[in-house]
Image: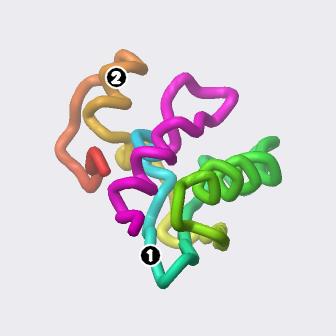
Amino acid sequence: MPTVEDVYTELRQVYDPEIPVNIVDLGLIYDVRLESESCNIKMTLTSQSCPEARSIPEVVKRRVTEIEGIGACQVEIVWEPTWTPQRISANGRRILGLPEEDGPAKDG
């Protein structure tokens, strides 16, 4: 039986093509829920005009359904709360060379 952490592990392999940080460390993943063999993910993008708005959710779906025991993945793009750079994890900030800040960012 897959776990939420299994999903996060797979999501850490998905990158925004314009930023060298995975979508978990960017703070784009808001919620992951497993129900039977289905995974529901609530996520955002760095902006509503993101040129990868179609491809990133498709990559997420493909990667998550490769996890043994998950047969379907639904990705919901949400705009609230709005993504800000403060959502970037400490690891992501190190990769980008940004100073560490206190804030809502979590390492997933």
Which residue was labeled with disc 2? 98
Q: Quadrant of the N terminus?
A: bottom left
Tell me the kind of residue under disc 2: Leu
Which contiguous range is marked in magenta?
A: 1-23
Q: Which residue is mark 1?
A: 33
Q: Which mark is residue 24?
A: none
Q: CA distance from mark 1 to mark 2?
A: 31 Å
Badge 1 density bin: few <14, some 14–19, many ≥20, Cα 10 Å: some
**Could you say where residue 12 lies in the image, as x and y percent from the top left?**
46, 40
Task: Please determine whether, in this image, residue 70 is positioned above or below residue 49.
Answer: below
Q: Between disc 1 and disc 2, whose residue precedes?
A: 1
Task: State the residue at coordinates (41%, 52%).
Answer: 8
Residue sitting farthest toward the left: 102
Q: Secondary structure at mark 2?
A: loop
Q: Residue at x 57, y 77 (%)?
A: 38
Q: Nearer the viewer, residue 3 or 11?
A: 3
In the rendered image, residue 32, in percent from the top left (x then y), is placed at 44, 69
Q: Please check the rendered image and state whether residue 11 is part of the magenta-colored stretch, yes or no.
A: yes
